[in-house]
Amino acid sequence: MLTKRKNFEILYLIALLALSLGLVVADRFFLDKSFIINSNSDYLIYASDDRTVGGLSQGKYSANNGDIHLDCELKKSAYAWPFCGIVIDFTESAARVKKDFGKDLSSFTSVLISAQYQSQKNKAERGVRIQSRNFNPVYSKKGDFDSLKYNALEFYPARESNPVELELAAFQSAPWWLNKFKLPISLAKAEFSNTYLFEVATGAGSPLGKYTLIIDQIEFKGRLVPTLHIYLSIALLWVLSGATLLMIRLKHYASALLKSNLKKAELESLNKLLNTQSQALADLVITDELTGIPNRAA
């Protein structure tokens, strides 16, 4: 019985170790997820520029073997921050089929962007602004473009590796937008749960002139299950397994102790019976059977 229990514990620990190693391997190789956007993606892609806000800049979108090309001419105007950009509309397909919802990007942790300016002129001064527009019924209204929350981050491609990986946690809501809608602090952080639009645009303060921005692809990266959850699960599994084995051992020891106590009680009862019988036999030896008077042996 003892050998059987020990064999069970050994097999249990081997299975537990194999499961833990399996979870570690799965975390390393199988739990990553990604969402890739390029010019072949089935979303409406178009160019935007500052003409919508009174500027004179002109942007043009074209596709080339999966790459997204933005040809832009930034022009001086009454608008202080000239820009051109590429807009990816998650609420409309390339065939102009509309949807009532955007793309949930909240489960992704970063975005990998391969974007470079084609010309070398003023390359170090040309920034790229990444921006998403999120719909939340708490503050957004259907048909009101301005009510979509601005979540933005800016970088300089000449100063970064290509592609550059940007953490979604680093995105910030535009201060002017927060000030306009007077949102509470609890709603001030960047949101990606219902992204209507994703934009790649020229950076604020970029030098005037003609540019071509080439975007190879945009890849959102995340995890099916966070690494922290995997290792917490392994730790919890070992703690619960240790507690289970301890309970099994305690139950075994309690059962063995109970059997030992029962055997002890049985032996004590048998000993009393033997003492009684021994005394009875001794009385028979020293007592006359007919008269009951002690005999010569007594």
Image (spheres, helix red, strand yellow):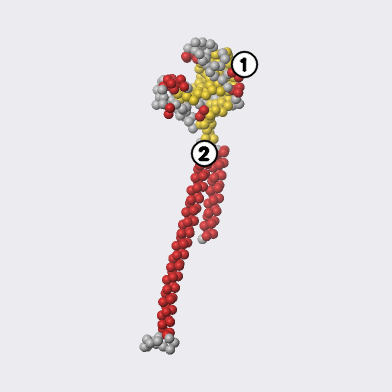
Specify few, some or many for label 1: CA neighbours under 10 Å numbering under 14, 14-19, or 20 or more. few
Camera sees residue 60: no
Camera sees residue 131: yes
Left or right: 193 with respect to 40?
Answer: left
Q: Position of residue 45 (x, y in %)?
A: 51, 21
In the foreground, 262 or 14 = 262
In primary-sequence order, the first of circles 2 and 1 is: 1
Q: Position of residue 167 (x, y in %)?
A: 53, 29
In the foreground, 52 or 177 = 177
Q: Position of residue 59 (x, y in %)?
A: 53, 15
Q: CA distance from mark 2 to mark 1?
A: 45 Å
The picture quadrant where one finds residue 63 is top right
Q: Secondary structure at mark 1?
A: loop
- Amino acid bearing label 2: Leu
In the foreground, 57 or 67 = 57
Quick one: quadrant of the C terminus? bottom left
- The residue under the point 43% across, 76% down is 275
Left or right: 285 with respect to 164?
Answer: left
**Disc number placed over residue 228 in the picture, else none:** 2
- Indicate whether 78 appears above or below 265: above
- Indicate whether 296 appears above or below 35: below
- The residue under the point 56% across, 20% down is 127
- Amino acid bearing label 1: Lys
Residue at the extreme left = 291
Q: Position of residue 139 (x, y in %)?
A: 40, 24
- The residue under the point 47% across, 14% down is 53
Q: Secondary structure at mark 2?
A: helix
Per the image, the residue denoted by label 1 is 121
